[in-house]
Amino acid sequence: MEEIKSDSTPQHRLISVESDAVLSKPVKSKRVASLDIFRGLTVALMILVDDAGGDWPMIGHAPWYGCNLADFVMPFFLFIVGMAIALALKRIPNQLMAIEKVTLRTLKLLFWGLLLQGGYSHAPDKLTYGVDMRKIRLCGILQRIALAYLVVALVEVLSRKTQACDEPFNHFSIFKSYFWNWLVGACILIVYSALLYGTYIPDWQFTVTDSDSVHYGRNFTVACGVRGSLDPPCNAVGYIDRKVLGIRHMYAHPAWRRSEACTENSPYAGPFRDNAPSWCFAPFEPEGILSSISAILSSIIGVHFGHVLIHFQDHSARLKQWVTMGFTLLILGLVLHFTHAIPLNKQLYTFSYVCVTLGAAALVFSVFYALVDIWGLRYLFLPLEWIGMNAMLVYVMAAAGIFAGFINGWYYEDPHNTLIYWIKKHLFIGVWHSKKVGILLYVIFAEILFWGLISGILHRFGLYWKL
């Protein structure tokens, strides 16, 4: 397991001098509490939607088109990663040292991503571990973060000499000073759009490999023969993943299984319709190759927000830049969606989805910044701040279910008779006489608040899990 370090020096700080001074000498700065709180909120949302989304589908991932609460989590993470890149790399003057740090952190993210989401861990529901290498899932949350982090961080490091750090910044010059970021972003958008709309999708076949399915071992053919489709069976995102990753290495339980075309219980999970189309039984990778390329845009916008934080000295100037961009992105994304030009789709990571989720991220962060870093209402969000300061630990233990899996390993007579099962049944579901309400309250209090307090204790002793 990655080393858990005792560190009294926070990682992300509010820098109140120009970046050339940052590169030349140590800086007196204070931690950006609003960024920690936003990160903590995002981790908490991940726990909430993962563990309560099955009973509350309106907060779980949208089956295909649209955007539910769960669909904001990944863009929020990538936005935060971008802000952190801008703040952290400004304090590393040596280019080679910065590249080494970026490369090492990328490799660590890839390792933990494969370990936690590749299929090796069966926590928290099954007391087993191990994965058939022929079916290991190659993509996942941390792998997508690793790609975005690597690309954006390298652009930030390698374009440092072109950044005009000695000029006074205004709302327009800051875009010019970091034009390489926007150029890379434009190239990413062009490549993504060209592949999404220009790739020809032929008919394809697959074999059901889920041993729990009544169709296990059966071969299906999906008819396509189209170009530019965004529908579930015949889009370029799935086609590229099937060709590059291999269908056996993709996510076996995609959200589209909850769509009306697949099940009568939609938006809840349920048995497939008798006349369900063949693609309902197929795997699909929600963190696939092409969609992850588009996801880099989320971190590029985050880097810009970090640059504003560094170079703008006045709170109102920062908020003006952030809020203006936030509303612009939000309105643009909604217009693209409701005019049916580009629909919102998290699975494909469409441009409208990028705009809406990043607009929301910008506005949410701006609210936290005003409440916490300007008005000093930090005490209202302490559990979220503590989670945000130990986000990796809480993600692994709570969101990935490792701690729950460990507790479930200590059962009485029957593997389902565990402490967690007893707490859910008697202290939450039994008290409220409702599974939906009980599960929701269990996740809020026994998971999110619990890990908030644990993170607070670790913070008290200066213990943080850093990659």
Image (spheres, rainbow, N blue to C red):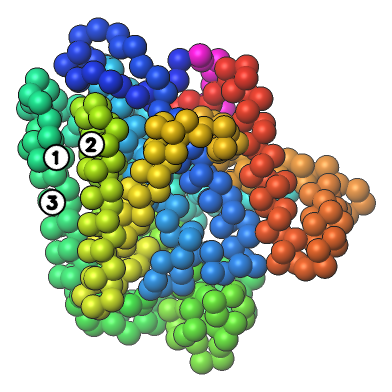
Residue at 14% over, 39% down: 171
Taken as a whole, is the magenta stretch helix, strand or loop? loop
Query: Can you see residue 36?
Result: no
450 relative to 338, above or below: above
For the residue pair 312 and 245, the one nearer the viewer reads as 312
The single residue placed furthest to the right in the displayed view is 413
Which residue, given by chain and number where applicable, does mark 3 sit on? 186
Relative horizontal placement of residue 199, taking residue 438 as reference (left or right): left
SS at circle 1: loop
Q: Nearer the viewer, mark 2 or mark 3?
A: 2
Which residue, given by chain and number where applicable, does mark 1 sit on? 171
Relative horizontal placement of residue 280, taking residue 444 as reference (left or right): left
Q: Nearer the viewer, mark 1 or mark 3?
A: 1
SS at circle 3: helix
Q: Which residues are magenta?
A: 1-8
- Spatial CA distance of label 1 from label 2 is 8 Å
For the residue pair 397 and 235, the one nearer the viewer reads as 397
Say which amino acid is labelled 1: His
Q: Residue 463: where, in percent of width, then height?
A: 58, 20
Quadrant of residue 110 within the rendered picture: top left
Query: First in sequence: mark 1 or mark 3?
Result: 1
Query: First in sequence: mark 2 or mark 3?
Result: 3
Residue 313 painted magenta:
no
Determine contact: label 1, label 2, CB under 8 Å: yes
Residue at 18% over, 70% down: 197
